[in-house]
Every structure is written in structure tokens, then in C-alpha cells.
Image (spheres, helix red, strand yellow):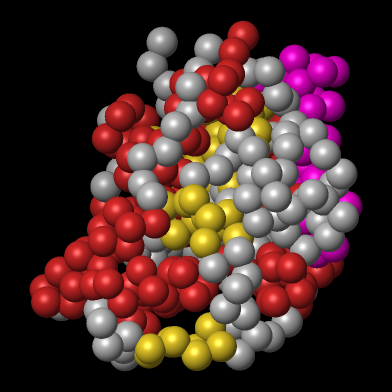
Amino acid sequence: MSETILILGASGQIGGELTEKLRNIYGSNHVIASDIRNGNDALMNSGPFEIIDATDKDGILEIVQKYKVTQIYLLAAMLSATGEQFPQKAWDLNMSSLLAVLDIAKEKHINQVYWPSSIAAFGPTTPKINTPQKTIMEPSTVYGISKISGEFWCNYYHEKFGVDVRSLRYPGIITWKSKPGGGTTDYAVDIFFKAIEEGTYECFLGENTRLPMMYMEDAVNATIKLMQADAKDIKVRTSYNLSAIDFTPKELATQIQQFLPDFKITYRPDFRQQIADSWPQTIDDSEARKDWNWSHKFDLSSMANDIIKNLQAQKINS
């Protein structure tokens, strides 16, 4: 049976690239992109697009029935840095949207749900090096609190109602196709744009702040691989640890200087430093690698090379 997929939050950083890849795999008409407002032209013109409030269960259900949707990817969320400024809004959006989608799955309108968790679900008391799959989780941000709560809701709906919901704890995700979206790891996106446009970057984290990261192509591939895996191979129904690379702002700047020798970086840590300090530095994702054969493709050097090459080409063509 072919899948018909609804993506909620398709205009976001991950949503746009995931939509593009899923349309290539399943066919444009089988992947319905949606968001609270219109997306960019590429997203709107490459297949069906609907305006949906991800917290509106009836509105989501209407679209599910209109297109005979079999899977929902719920990517609508308020991220870590933005969430600290609007805590109540972040909690309401992040929780209401998940519970709406889980209920639709519980009522058997769809077969599968994908919902991303994050390294933000960990906290200051979590072991920071090679953070294990099961460990202390006492998050100190609203985003993290909503993610750890969401993981338990996913597990609850799976255990109680048999809902096939799957999740990944994303590390910081780096892309060149869209500008940053309000996350703490976004310096690693912004730095490339500024390096190409201005040749200099003021970083909002300290130079030695090590965080787990991943190139967008790997994140998209991991997400699809998880969703395509046989249900019997999915052993974790909270959320899988996921890892690829880790680095500090200083190490990233040095890597960029290999390609752009005149690039300069300065450091002015702000409120996001405290958020970053509460997160792991490296992640043990051996369970994802064992259960459904996850493996990443990009290291720091190949990622930096790919991003700079693409941004330079974009600049020439614009």
C-alpha cells in the first residue's frame, strides 16, 4: 500500500527539506505540506499545500480525510531560544499539537506518526559525554520540558492504544537552504551565511561550547529510515538518541577558514549560553544504529565543504 503523508510545520527548517525528499520518494501528490501560513514558492509549487493550525485537531482531521492520509509527520514547534521568551505559548503549541495528532492515530484515522524530540530533553544533571539512551532527564528549558513530556506521551499512546509513533532526539541540525529558526544550535547555521556574506561572525556561544550536531541531509535520511523500518525493529517508543558529529564554535570557525582563510569570528555569549551548557556534548546513539541500521554520512569537513560550495553558488546565481 502506498503512503500518503501529511507534514505539519512544513515551512520550518526541517519541514521544507523533509517534504522535498519525501515527495521524491512517494510522489508529489502523496505528500501534503502544511503550515500555519503559506510556505516558500518551491514548497507551494511542488505539490499539495494546506494552511493548518497544528493545534486544531478537527482541522487536521479534515485534511487527513480529504487526502486519505496514512502518516503524519508533526514538525510544528516553538524551539528552545524562542520558547524561553514565550514559555506558555511554547508549551501550548508543542503539547496541544502532539496530543491532537496522537488522538487522530488512536482513533485509527492514520497508521503512523513521526514526532521529533531533541537533545533539549536532557538537562544539567544528565551525563554530558556519550549520553546514554536511558539516563537522567531533568530539562531546564520549556522546550526541553515539552520534549520530555512528549516522549512519555508517545510511549503511553503506543503502550495503551497501540499507536505506531516514532521519534528521534535531534541534535543541532545544520542546513544552508533556510535561515535559522530560533534554536540554540543555530549559530552553526548562521555562521555560514555570515562567513559568505560578511566574512565575519559574532557568536552567541563561547568558543569552547561543544554540542552534538548533524547535517540536514543526515537528519532527513535518519527520519525517513526510522519511519520505513519494520515496526518489530523499533524497540524504543519514547525517542531514539541520534548522533553524527560534535564540535565547538572555535573548531567550526577553524574548519570554515580552511575554505575561507580571511573569515574572522568573535564571541559574545548571551542567554543561549546557559541553555547550551545544560545540554550534552556527545551522544551515544548505538541503539538506533543497532535496531534500524542508522549511520551518518557527513563529518565536519565534508559538511562545511558542501555548505560553502552551495552558498557560494547561490550567491553567484542571485
Place of residue 123 in the rendered image (x, y in percent of width and height, measured from the top left):
81, 56
Tell me if I can see residue 67 in this picture. Answer: no
Q: Residue at x 60, y 73 (%)?
A: 208
Left or right: 254 in relation to 158: left
Q: Quadrant of residue 29?
A: top left
The answer to if 41 sits in the magenta stretch is no
Quarter of the image with the C terminus is bottom left
Residue in the foreground of this view, choosing between 12 and 97: 12
Place of residue 225 in the rendered image (x, y in percent of width and height, measured from the top left):
45, 27
Magenta stretch bounds: 138-164
Left or right: 104 in relation to 254: right
Quarter of the image with the N terminus is top left
The answer to if 142 sits in the magenta stretch is yes
Place of residue 144 in the rendered image (x, y in percent of width and height, measured from the top left):
77, 56
Q: Residue at x 32, y 45 (%)?
A: 20
Left or right: 192 in relation to 294: left
Q: Residue at x 73, y 34 (%)?
A: 133
Place of residue 38 in the rendered image (x, y in percent of width and height, measured from the top left):
43, 62
Residue in the foreground of this view, choosing between 218 and 2: 218
Residue occupying the far left of the picture? 317
Residue in the foreground of this view, choosing between 23 and 195: 195
